[in-house]
Amino acid sequence: MTDPILLEIDGAIALVTLNRPQRLNALSYDLIDRLMAALDRIEGDDAVRAVILTGAGTRAFSAGADIHEFSGSVRHGPAIAVRDFVRRGQAMTARLEAFRKPVVAAINGIAFGGGCEIAEAVHLAIASDRALFAKPEIKLGMPPTFGGTQRLPRLAGRKRGLELLLTGEPFSPQHAREIGLVNSIVPHDQLLTAARELAGRIIGHSPGAVGGVITAVTRGLNMPIAEGLLVESEQFAALVPGRDLAEGLTAWKQRRVTNSSQ
């Protein structure tokens, strides 16, 4: 049986691939569970400093939930459907959003439904010029359930988010960039190179500082600014006793002395 998740670690960067290309990398329950396990492994490996998440094959990042599997849960009623499907998917996107190491999505094709919700949840995203996005859950007679009703309007704004959620119509990578869903668009054959380059620009910094930024932003966005500032303060305070901050301040002062003496 083919593993639905591939994990390759190259130096400080982990490449995680959704690996069901014959099903357009649909998010089966097993795939989600194995993705969560891969994140656990990455979290525990101090040598890994960043994650790139992409899809196998040439057609899709992920076409969304595995409808055949999901339908089986629906037939058993709301309690089972919520337990097996909704909670599992929401736990996945929440884990990606709160992950202390930067997660860069490399959107290599279709990102529909749950695949789009992964793009909404991760910290950064780069789209291939062949990518295509959609929120088609409305066409199934349901709202998005992996966080799309909450994250997409926060990214795009209420009215633009609602238009995408209520029509279910596909949208281009250019529109995804305009609404803040992706950071940039690159030629398809340069996608992973661009993702690695972006990750490389981040991992040169202190891992504690990177994690602090991610946590402060992720938690603070859902709080009044006064509460968010407390989170920011907590993240800074946690770094004060550490070596990275002391070394960073010392290096800055040494550069300042060197520049002023020239």
Image (cartoon, rainbow, N blue to C red):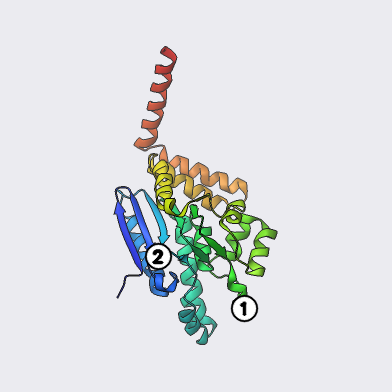
- Could you say which is closer to the camera, residue 38 or residue 10? 10
- Could you say which is closer to the camera, residue 108 or residue 10? 108
Residue behind mark 1: 141
Q: Position of residue 71 (x, y in %)?
A: 50, 82
Q: Residue furthest top?
A: 261
Q: Nearer the viewer, mark 2 or mark 1?
A: 2
Q: Quadrant of residue 165?
A: bottom right
Would you place residue 215 above or below residue 130 in this image?
A: above
For numbered disc 2, what is the local secondary structure?
loop
Q: Quadrant of the N terminus?
A: bottom left
Residue 57: mark in rendering: 2
Label 1 environment density (alpha carbons within 10 Å; few <14, some 14–19, many ≥20): few
For the residues labelled 2 and 1, the Cα–Cα distance comes to 29 Å
Q: Residue furthest right?
A: 159
Would you place residue 219 above or below residue 209 in this image?
A: below
Residue 154 is left or right of residue 202, and the answer is right
Residue placed at 32% from the left, 55% from the top?
44
Query: Hey, what amino acid is under mark 1?
Result: Gly
Q: Position of residue 258 (x, y in %)?
A: 39, 17
Q: Quadrant of the C terminus?
A: top left
Q: Are marks 2 and 1 in contact (CB under 8 Å)?
A: no
Q: Position of residue 187 (x, y in %)?
A: 48, 51
Q: Position of residue 141 (x, y in %)?
A: 62, 78
Query: Hey, what amino acid is under mark 2?
Result: Gly
